[in-house]
Amino acid sequence: MEFDLIDLIRRHTAQSRDDVRMGIGDDAAVLAVPPGQELAVAIDTLVEGVHFPPGTAPADIGWKALAVNLSDLAAMGASPAWALLALTLPSPDPVFIEGFAEGFAQLAQPYRLALIGGDTTRGPMTISMAVHGFVAPGKALLRAGACVGDAVLVTGTLGDAAAGLQLLQRGGPVDESDARYRFLAERLNRPTPRLASGMALRERATSCIDVSDGLLADLGHICAASDVAAEIESVLLPRSPALLSLFDETTARDFALSGGDDYELCFTVPMARVAEVQADLARLGCGATRIGRIVEGSGVRVRDVDGQWLESTRQGWDHFAA
Ligand code: ADP
Ligand code: MG
């Protein structure tokens, strides 16, 4: 596509790194992996109308396309370095590109992450981003490794992005001056990848995943990979004041259990190390809450506030019918 557009992207995302021998501008990027490091690589695609609503600000899309990928590196305990961007747009719109590149750059800059290439084509709006990070040999945090007796923890709060999406989709009047609304919309549009926390969890967590599809689904992946089960106490689920004040308890609980797009880390640590790990993450400005434990078996069970086990319904979660 038009060279100007690629040049626009390049100018907005310029980031010089010694390990980029050739970045945007040739047929392929040429990169030097630091000696003694392994590469962690991930790719995610955002489709308009599926992964973000039409009308989302271009800068928010640029931020989020990178954030969801960095969240995958965070879950591996990797330190981010490079990104590739495949951009499909209905028209070569410089206003969109400029906004997108700015949102991307805002998140990329503090990590000195370099955009090293990509592809630009015409079609329904679709954004594929790939990221590359470094991790010491054998030190990547995997989904497999959770042990019976381990504690299950999550960073931050859960359910905010689902709440933000619902407020957005509800249409009607939302009070933009309401700080609670702005907080939830920000959690949806500008998720914070927990990179520093992921790196701090290397050598400490026995397993780790980022919460993109909802706690139950993603913790379920840890359980399957680790061949264990998890028991979660819904009373322990960390939820933001904004979520709790705008939604009733049951809805807030269901958002926290099944809502997606939070990009927090869910991880397991031996019970004896919980306090130490919480203190480490607190020093990085990231809360971590113990929400349950690993037991023998398979799957994830949730005990509600009243001590009853919950079961899945089409709308959300209910008590087991007696
Ligand atoms: P080619 O036809 O050789 O694939 P392109 O015209 O597609 O070359 O791309 C030219 C240069 O611009 C390449 O270095 C490519 O990586 C880069 N590039 C193209 N699109 C993007 C994009 N959306 N973001 C970043 N770099 C891009
Ligand atoms: Mg190309």
Image (tube, rainbow, N blue to C red):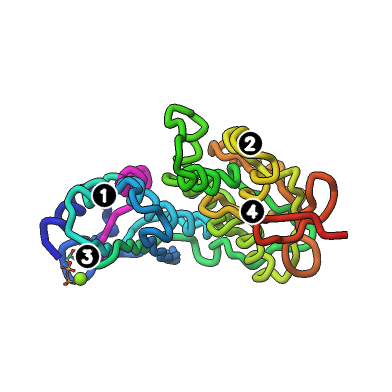
Decide: few, some or many residues near mark 1? Use Cα within 10 Å; few <14, some 14-19, many ≥20: many
Q: Which stretch did the figure color magenta? A: 103-119
Question: Residue 120's mark?
Answer: 3
The Cα–Cα distance between marks 3 and 4, rounded to whole angstroms, is 41 Å
Question: Residue 244's mark?
Answer: 2
Question: Residue 76's mark?
Answer: none
The Cα–Cα distance between marks 2 and 4, rounded to whole angstroms, is 32 Å
Q: Are marks 3 and 4 in contact (CB under 8 Å)?
A: no
Q: Residue at x 71, y 55 (%)?
A: 317
What's the residue type where badge 1 is placed?
Answer: Ala
The Cα–Cα distance between marks 2 and 3, rounded to whole angstroms, is 42 Å
Decide: few, some or many residues near mark 4? Use Cα within 10 Å; few <14, some 14-19, many ≥20: some
Q: Residue at x 66, y 64 (%)?
A: 220
Which quarter of the picture shows residue 216? bottom right
Q: Are marks 1 and 2 in contact (CB under 8 Å)?
A: no
Q: Is mark 3 within 8 Å of ligand 1?
A: yes
Ligand 2: give its quadrant. Answer: bottom left
According to the image, label 1 marks what residue? 101
